[in-house]
Amino acid sequence: MKFHALISEFCVAKPLKNKWRNQSRRINCSKYLCFLLMFSIVLLIFLRHLFFFSIDARPSSHHHSKKKIHSLVGESSSQDSCLGRYIYIHDLPMRFNQDLLTNCQVLTRSIDKTSMCEYVQNSGFGPRILSSEASGLWNSNWFWTNQFMLEVIFHDRMKKYKCLTNDSLVASAIFVPYYAGLDLRRYLWGFNTSMRDSSGFDLINWLKQKPQWKTMWGKDHFLVSSRIARDFRRKSDRKSDWGSNFRFLPESKNLSMLTIESGPWENDIAVPYPTSFHPSSDYQVLQWQNLMRTQNRPYLFSFAGASRTRQKNSTRKEIIRHCQSSNKLCKLLDCNSVGHECDDPLKLMNLFRSSIFCLQPPGDSLTRRSTFDSILAGCIPVFFHPGSAYTQYLWYLPKNYSNYFVFISATDLKLRKVRIEEKLVTVSKDEVASMREEVIRLIPRIIYGDRRSGVESVEDDAFDLAIKGVLKRLDRCRGSDL
């Protein structure tokens, strides 16, 4: 007999069938007891229905899904330190990332001084630097890091991010671990545009098939590039034109791309070039900062770089001329010379930490890795174009930029209206000390710490600030869509 039928007979004072048939006494039920029993049954059915409906239902937008989840968890959500910081990582086919590292020989060009396979080790940091110098700082935290390994470094850090989730519905952002720069590197020279564009096109088609894409049509997705943004914005299909058309694909425009150099495009955000310093603790950072505060700096200014012979009226050509005629106020490290000293992190650091000012002119593009090397050495940067730093790295460099660097107009330099040494000599000792301290304070913000030990002790490094920036940016994006 069904339960509700049993209750019905029980409560209407009818004799019950089956095993109670021969009982002489009928069981009576008060109206109050019947009401409680029936109310309890209805309530249980209602709650059961509500519970399964809340699990099976799929909200129409990411914003609404997060409200639904928040209402289900109730007050316990206030104790979730990851609320609003969850990130979901797409499990891409290996051809978009890991296969590029497995077959790293295809990334090496014939003119490269070192095989790219060397830089793949240590999660993209490259080989560890072992120095005979007395300071143990060199032996534990320094690596031969190639700037094109940023995608690998960032992906490894994402795997260790403490607020990862396997449920994309609770994620505030979705990471796409596509090694865009390394993938493009294979086809930049000697290949037609179809080859350069194929992987980006395939990636977008893969993403479009995923339910996570349809939530915000990719606006909550982000990826990282170790190449400048311009490399992914080829405007024509002429073979002679540089780069790919990845960022001109309609769906790709919704993605946010963290890149070593941005441009005028809305969804490209500049993050620091990777340096060779990857500390694993705040104490190691503090040690390095204190060391840079006590350095003897015999040179007023220095420059590490090569002249651009193909560029007419090159700023670098003027800088080298000024340096060579400065009567030993400037130290020049010529990157065209034999021995490739500019590729040696120790030689670069020795140059920059012995200089008060470090010259950072544009090269093949507006930005340089050398800018971050000089900051790391406590050397005050001297810029010749606004797009070389303070209009680029908005998440990393303070707005009061005159407090930590010097600006010299490239136009005035070429017209010989200004001499570099005369400009820099006018900066007082007190101003130099103040600016250097500001530069040294920036060091934790522009390095990518080593988290491979699993200990999160380097707080607010370049990776952390990138993630905070992405989450804040996407939160504003959702607000504007409401």
Image (cartoon, rainbow, N blue to C red):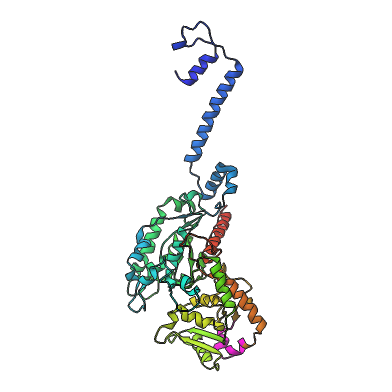
Specify whether residue 17 is in view.
no
Q: Is residue 155 left or right of residue 428?
A: left
Q: Nearer the viewer, residue 199 or 27?
A: 27
Q: Is residue 421 magenta?
A: yes
Q: Is residue 157 above or below residue 303?
A: above
Q: Residue at x 60, y 44 (%)?
A: 75
Specify whether residue 150 is in view.
yes
Q: Residue at x 55, y 79 (%)?
A: 385
Q: How many marks?
A: 0
Which of the 4 image quadrants contains residue 116? bottom left
Q: Residue at x 55, y 63 (%)?
A: 459
Question: x%, y% of residue 363?
Answer: 47, 80
Which of the 4 image quadrants contains residue 104? bottom left
Q: Is residue 221 above or below residue 375?
A: above
Q: Which residues are magenta?
A: 407-424
Q: Is residue 59 left or right of residue 97?
A: right
Q: Is residue 288 magenta?
A: no
Question: x%, y% of residue 129?
Answer: 43, 74
Q: Is residue 19 above or below residue 384?
A: above
Furthest-top residue in this view:
24
Quarter that holds the N terminus = top left
Q: Nearer the viewer, residue 109 or 463?
A: 463
Question: x%, y% of residue 79?
Answer: 59, 48
Question: x%, y% of residue 291?
Answer: 56, 76
